[in-house]
Amino acid sequence: MHALMFARRLCCLVVVGLGVAMLVHDAKAAEELPAATTRWNGFAVHTVESDGRKGMVVAPGTVAAIPEGRGKPWVWIGEFPHVVTDFETRMLRAGYHIVYLPTPNQFGMPPAMKAWEAFYYQLTNKYGFDRKPALVGISRGGLYVYSWAALHPDRVSSIYSDAPVCNILSWPGGKSQGAAFKGPGSEPNWKMLKELAGLATDAEMATAGLSPIDKLEPLAKAKLPLLHVYGDADEVVPWDENTGELAKRYQALGGEIRLIPKPGVKHHPHGLPDSTPIVEFVTTNWDLAK
């Protein structure tokens, strides 16, 4: 019963989202962002109010050239902005905005996606941002970006994930879900996730289809390019239970995914010393998006 209710809630979000997409205006009529409130690494930081939340928009000094029919290019971070500093800074220098909407401890569930809908509408309809941002899923941020992409594969140009959570049974479930899982998990986060899902038992969670690994078919049909960077000795979010399993399933569906392992790296780190491969992946696929 609970799983059926959750599925219906997701369907409602899809219907609402389709309505929002029809309202997106041409970028030429865009308003200016609100006045900058602070600076990060020399770039202006703007606050955009959305549905009672304060979204963060870091603006480039000069916006990248915008092709006909497109809006301002942007990178939407699911969680933990300013963790992959080299990547963010280089994207800003390339003329992309960096965007983040705080929805903490919601794990990409319907309440978070509802907030994302409102924020996306503001950025694309009011401020002239492109309809297809690049998504960045850092750690549990992977739950957010894959939930959004599964609902709206037509509103994504690419997904770059960094040591992402792709399987809720691995994290936050972890060893509490059985000896088959390597990671320690997080019992408080597992409890919060169950409450958000409206599910009472671990067995229901295991079959509810809430993980990114369960949401890949619409992404593969849309031919969304994926890039995952991960430590192959990550002890918090074991790569084989998360990125490895996602890659296997995505490729089986005919999807394209590039993997960049960091050999021997533990402790759930993020980013690359030289983010060139990530920057090229994002900019190339934004240029190719239509």
Image: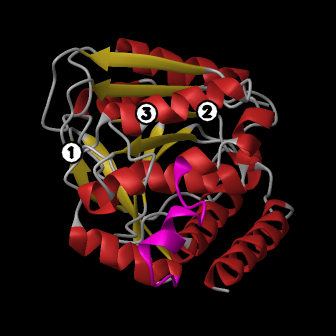
Towards the viewer: 141 or 29: 141
| Residue 165 highlighted magenta (yes or no) | no
Instruction: State the predominant SS element of the stretch in magenta.
Output: loop
Sort mark 3 into few (<14), some (14-19) or many (20+) by Cα contacts within 10 Å.
Answer: many
Indicate whether 84 appears above or below 137.
above
Do the residues under discs 2 and 1 have CB atoms within 8 angstroms? no
Magenta residues, as a range? 198-212
Q: How is the image coloured?
A: secondary structure
Residue drawn at 73 percent across, 30 percent down: 253
Where disc 1 sits, the SS reads loop
Residue on which the image places disc 1:
236
Residue drawn at 37 percent across, 13 percent down: 276
Q: Residue furthest left?
A: 267
Q: Amino acid at mark 1?
A: Val
Q: CA distance from mark 2 to mark 1?
A: 22 Å
Residue on which the image places disc 3:
243
| Residue 204 highlighted magenta (yes or no) | yes
Q: Amino acid at mark 2?
A: Arg
Q: Amino acid at mark 3?
A: Thr
Instruction: Give the number of callouts.
Output: 3
Residue 168 visible to the viewer: yes
Residue on which the image places disc 2:
249
Q: Is residue 84 left or right of residue 123?
A: left
Do the residues under discs 2 and 3 have CB atoms within 8 angstroms? no
Residue 95 visible to the viewer: no
Quadrant of the image containing the C terminus: top right
